Amino acid sequence: MEYSPENERQSFRELLNQANELSTSSLRDEVVSSLYQTSQQICSRTVRFTKSKEDKKTERLDAIFTSPIWGFPIMLIMLGLIFYLTIAGANVPSSMLANFFTWLEDYISMAFFALNSPDWLHGVLVLGLYRGTTWVISVMLPPMAIFFPTFALLESYGYLPRVAFNMDRLFKKVGAHGKQSLTMAMGFGCNAAAVLSTRIIESPRERMLAILTNNFVPCNGRWGTLIVLASLFMAAGFTGGMKTLVSSGVIVGIVIFGIFVTFAVSWVLSKTMLKGVPTHYTLELPPYRRPKFFDTIVRSSLNKSYAVLMRAIKIAAPAGILTWVFANIYIGDTSIFMYGVNFLDPFAQSLGLDGYIMLAFLLGLPANEVVLPILLMGYLSTGSMLEVDNLADLKNIFLDQGWTWLTALNMMLFSLLHYPCGTTLINIYKETKSYKWTFVAFLIPTVIAIGVTFAVAQLVRGMGWV
Amino acid sequence: MTTNEVYRIALAGNPNTGKSTLFNALTGLKQHTGNWAGKTVSLAEGSVHYKKNTYRLIDLPGTYSLYSNSTDEEVARNYIVFEKPHVTLVVLDATSLERNLNLALQVMEMTSNVIVCVNLIDEAKKRGIEIDELKLMRQLGVPVLKISARNKTGFPALLDTIDRMIRGEISTSPYAIQYNDETEGKISQLVPNVKKLVGDRFPSRWIALRLLDGDTSLLDEIQKRMHQEEESTWNTVQKTSGSHLENF
Amino acid sequence: MNLYEGNKGDRIRIKEVAIEGVMRRRLLDLGFVPGAVVDVLKKSPLGDPIAFRVSHTTIALRKEESIKITGELIQDDNE
C-alpha cells in the first residue's frame, strides 16, 4: 500500500475498530489483576518481613494527630505557630531590608543628580521602578523565606496528609477534596504558589474548586494591610495587651469569614457550574519520616520563595513605573491618578470606600503588597510610593481623608475578597489552560467583594452606626 | 565511547517514594523546570556529570500506575514511550514494594532500558523488611540497586550502572507479564497490525495491550508523535544485544 | 460485609470491588484487588474517611467508595 496521510488515518481507524471489538471489561480487570499477582509473586520470593517497632511509631503518632479530641486543636496550633513564626520572624529582617534599600536609594539619587539626569528619568527609574520593586522585596521576601520552608518541613515529615484526612468530611460536604485544606494553608503564604500546589488534588473537579476559591484566604501580601487596619481602627479604644488581642481577634474573624466564603462558593459551584463532573477520592497517609532539615529548608527557599519573588518583581517593576507615570503626568492641572480617583469615587463611596482606595486596588492588581503604598502616595499626593513608619501618623493621614471604622472594615473585606493578583491569575491560566476559567476566577471574587462591601456599607449607614 | 555526550534519564515512581529526594540529591541545585511536548505539565530537570558524560535527569510526576487515568500518568507515560529517555530509573519504596512493583512492571512493558532503584532501604531495615536484591534482579531481568536517597547511599553503584547501560554493556531482558490465554490471543491478533503502522519505533506489544484496555486516546497521540518524529532528527538509543544479565 | 462497616482492628479479605471507571482503576492500583487483605486502621475525627492498611501502605477512602468494596472478615489469632 502506498503511503499517504489518508491511508494512514484509515489504517489507524481500522486498528482502533479491531481493538474495540476485542476489548471487554473483564479483559481490563484481567490485565490489572495479572499485574498485581505478578508483583505479589515476585515480592513473596524476594521480600522477608520480620516484626518491628517502626509501624507502631506511625500508629502512635496518628493516634494523636488524627484523634477526635486532639486532632483539630493540634492543627490550629500548628497553623497559628506558622503564622506567628512568619509574622514575628519577618518583622526585623523586613525593616532591615527596607532601611537598606532606602539607604541605597539616597546614593542612587545622588548619582542621578551628579549626572544631571532629567527629573522625569529619576522619577520613573528610582521613585517608580526602584521603590516599587524594593518595597515588594522587603515586604515579601522575609515572610516567604520563613513560611515556605516551615510548610515544607511539615510536608516532608508527613503531617500534611493527616490534615487532609481530618478535614475531609467538611470539604466533602461542599463537594470539595480534603486536600483543599492544604492548598488553602499554602494560600496563606501565597495564592499564586497555592494555585500551583492544587496539583496534589487529582480529580479535576475538586482541583478546579480549589483553584477558584483559593483567593479567599488572605495571602502574605494582604496580611500587612489587614494587620495595619485592624490595629489602627478596630482596636482603637484599647491599649496594651488588650489591643493586640482585639486586633488579632478581628483578623481571625476576617480569616474565618474568608473560609466561610470558600465553603459557600465551593458548595454553589459544585451544585452549578461544576456539577456532575466525576469525583474520585483516595488519600495516602505515608509513614512519618524525620525530614532532612537543612536540605528541605534550602530547597524550598530556593524553589518556592525565589520563584514567587522573581515573578512578583517582574510584575512589581512595571507597576511601579506605571503608578509613577499616573501620578506625575498632568492633563491640565490634574494628574491621571486624580482623574482615576475622581472617576471611581462615587462607586467606591457606595461600597464604603473612596476613589483612592479603589484606584489603589486597581493599580495593585500586579501584587497586593503595593496597595497600601499606592494609597498613601495618593493621599499625600507625593507622586511616589512611600512607607510611613509611625502608625499614629498613618492613622492621622487616614482620618484626614474622612476615614471611619467602616472604611477600614470594608477595605479589609475588599482586600480579603477581591480578584486574585496578577501572578495568581497567570498561574490559574497556566494550570487550567482556559480563558473562561481564568475569567471566572476573576469574576467570582470581584462580584462577592463588591456585593459584601456594598451590603455592609448600606447596613452600617442605614442603621446610623457611623 | 564518545565523551561529553548528554543522555536523558527519566525518573519514574509512586508518590512518596523519595523520587524527588533522589532527584535533588543527584542534581544538587543545578535544576530548572522544562516544558515537554505535552506542555500542560512542566517537569523538573537537572543534570549530573559522570565520567565525562552529562546525564539530564527528568523528574516525572509521581504516579501509582501508567494507565493514563490522570494527566500526571499520561505525562509520565508519554515521556517514557515517546521521548524515549536513554534510561528510565524506576524508584521503588522498599517499605511497600508490592504496590511499587506494579509500576516497575508497567515501565518494563514499555522500554527495556530500565534500572530499578529500591529506595528507603534504611527505613525498610528499621521495620524489619529484608529485600534480596540479587533475586529481585534475576526475577525482573533488569538491574536492581538498593539506595537511600536521604542518606545518599548507593549512588556510586547507581551512576556506574547508568553509565554501563548507556554504553551498552548491560543488556536487559525485562520480565514480561503473561496474561491469560484469551488476552494473549487478542494481543497476538493486534500486534502485527500495530507493527505495520508504527514499525519498531514504539513498543508494539504494549500498544496492543493499551488498546485492548480501551485507551483510545493513545492512537491519536501516536499519530501526532509520528509526524513530529519525521520532522525532527533525534537520536534514539541504540540497543545492543549479545551480552547477558550475568555481566553486571 | 463492606469495608465501611469494618471496625478498627478488623482484617477483611476483599471479594468484590463494585466500582467502575477511573476510580476502580485507582483502587486496583493501590492494592484494593479481590483476594487482598485489608486492615481497618482508624476513622477520621469526623467519622469519614476511614484509613485502611493495604499492601503495606495506608490509604484513606471515603464512605462512598468503601461501602462498595465487599469482603469477608478474617479471624486472626496472631495479633
Image (cartoon, rainbow, N blue to C red):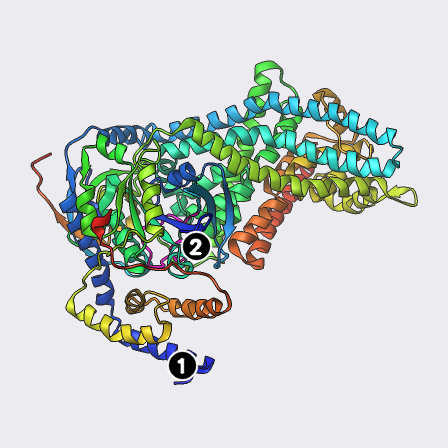
Label 1 SS: helix
Please give the chain letter of the residue carrying mark 2: A
Q: Picture coordinates of residue B119 (x, y %)?
A: 30, 39
Please tell me whether residue A184 is drawn above or below residue B10 in the rendered image.
above
**Residue identified by numbered label 1:** A10
Regarding residue A188, the answer to whether it shows in the image is no
At 61% across and 22% down in the image, what residue appears?
A93
Place residue A390 in its image quadrant: top right
Residue B174, horizontal then vertical, whole percent: 24, 56
Q: Which residues are magenta?
A: B55-75
The label shown at residue A204 is: 2
Examine the rendering and report whether any part of residue A403 can be seen: yes
As helix, strand or loop, the secondary structure at mark 2 comes to: helix
- Looking at the figure, which quarter contains the N terminus of chain A? bottom left
Q: Nearer the viewer, residue B233 or A325?
A: B233
Q: Nearer the viewer, residue B200 or C28?
A: B200
Give the alpha-carbon distance from disc 1 to disc 2, as whole Å: 33 Å
